[in-house]
Amino acid sequence: MSASKSSSYEILTLESNDQQRTVDIRTGTVSVDYYEDIFSPTITAKIKVANTGTSIAPKDNPDGPKQSIYHGLPLRGGERLRMKILDRGEGKLGLDFATDPSKYLFVSSITDVISETQRESFTLNLVSREAITNETTRVIKKYNTGSTIDNSVKSILKDILKTDKFSDQSIEKAQNKYGFVGNLRKPFSVLVWLASKSVPVSSGDATAGFFFYQTQDGFNFKSIDGLISQEPKATYIESQVNKGDTERNNDFIISDYYTDKNQNLIEKLRLGTYCSQRMFFNPLDFSFTNPSEGKFQLDSYKEKIKNLGKKLELPLIADDSNKQLGEIPTRILSAVVDIGTMEKDVSTDENADPGEYQAQAIMRYNVLFTQTISMTVPCNTNLRAGDTINCLFPKISKDSGDEFDLDQSGLYMIKELCHHFEPERSFTSMLLIRDTFGLFKEE
């Protein structure tokens, strides 16, 4: 059976704020949307519900006439939801936020409320428990310069957010050490900020840039290079031919796709993606670095960075020039170097020297979004934000036959995804990103 068929709502139980009353909303659920995004520190979900006025007894009169969920539970925000949905595709594990209380989802808001005489409908907007904790806690303490950034990330998750939804494998090691003060900022803000300063151990000093995000498995602190290096989770093929439900490959057919963006050269040049100069002020001796000495060129890192496709190639700046765009600085970066501000003893060492990571991170983040594609496939709950998948697109030509487009096809990273469930169908929509063109990665 194709995974685009309906999935099974195993558990959809809403629990009141006092945790004394529950109501099963499976029969009234119109649709469920579950979201992940490598730019989002928390998972989210939406459930559209329609029910009659005979769903739950009043709180103050258990034997009285039943009421609707909105007024009978009542729904006021903060309620817990147990959710388990089985994906009917072969080998799919589904979504499980019901067996472990720490994974229960929480109602952040109730929208689209429509009340009629004998019927009501509303939308439950859901978040993880940590999203609520993030709003009620602050990072206060000082983190010393002797600790690498990944250790600070683990400390914030464990001590501030009070969560164990991470592992040594989900928190990638960073090579650079960084000292900072929380300054009463929210945990998620600090964690995303630290991600932009981190340099992965695996790539030496080639490329900075991490993502902090949550999937159904828990929290992740992963480098761009680390995500690119993983094996693809699946291979999807775009086909104009409809196949029978008995064919297993129907689960990996691209239902629909379109290209949102294919390079924005002017924007990349404005951001200094390919080449920039760095100038920093030293508050210890009141000196400035020479911009020409702090020059960042993509060509210096092209052989070190990992790509989803072929090596990045840039055009010449002019017809009569032998220089590429990556050799001419298009942005000057300036900042105050953090020296001697975190420790009792005055140090002349930079605190996570921005000269080592700032330009690299700008390059890495922006190059990754060279291409963006929106795609819909049969529901696959085994996919996660941050995974890579292999996509094969047909070559558009009169005589192409069954050939694939070797430039458009290849590996893509899942920037965000949505698993959509309805009583009669289910599917997964994704926003895919890629840094270069080409069918295969070059070693």
Image (spheres, grey):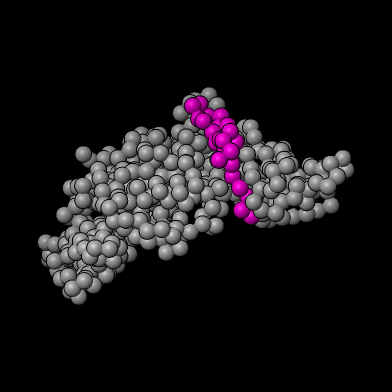
Which residue appears at 48% of the width and 32% of the height? 251
Residue 15, image x, y percentages: 69, 43
Q: Is residue 297 left or right of residue 73?
A: left
> Which quadrant is home to the N terminus?
top right
Residue 363, image x, y percentages: 27, 57
In the orientation shown, which residue stands out farthest toward the bottom?
A: 286
Verify whether residue 100 appears in magenta.
yes
Front residue (pair 343, 176): 343
In the rendered image, the vertical position of residue 292 relative to residue 43, given as above or below: below
The answer to which image quadrant residue 100 occupies is top right
The answer to which image quadrant residue 285 occupies is bottom left
In the orientation shown, which residue stands out farthest toward the top?
A: 246
Note whether residue 185 is visible: yes
Q: Is residue 18 left or right of residue 161?
A: right
Front residue (pair 404, 268): 268
Residue 419, image x, y percentages: 53, 42
Which residue appears at 45% of the width and 63% of the height? 184
Which residue appears at 52% of the width and 49% of the height? 130
Verify whether residue 145 appears in magenta.
no
Residue 125, image x, y percentages: 61, 51
In the orientation shown, which residue stands out farthest toward the right?
A: 64
Q: Magenta residues? A: 85-109
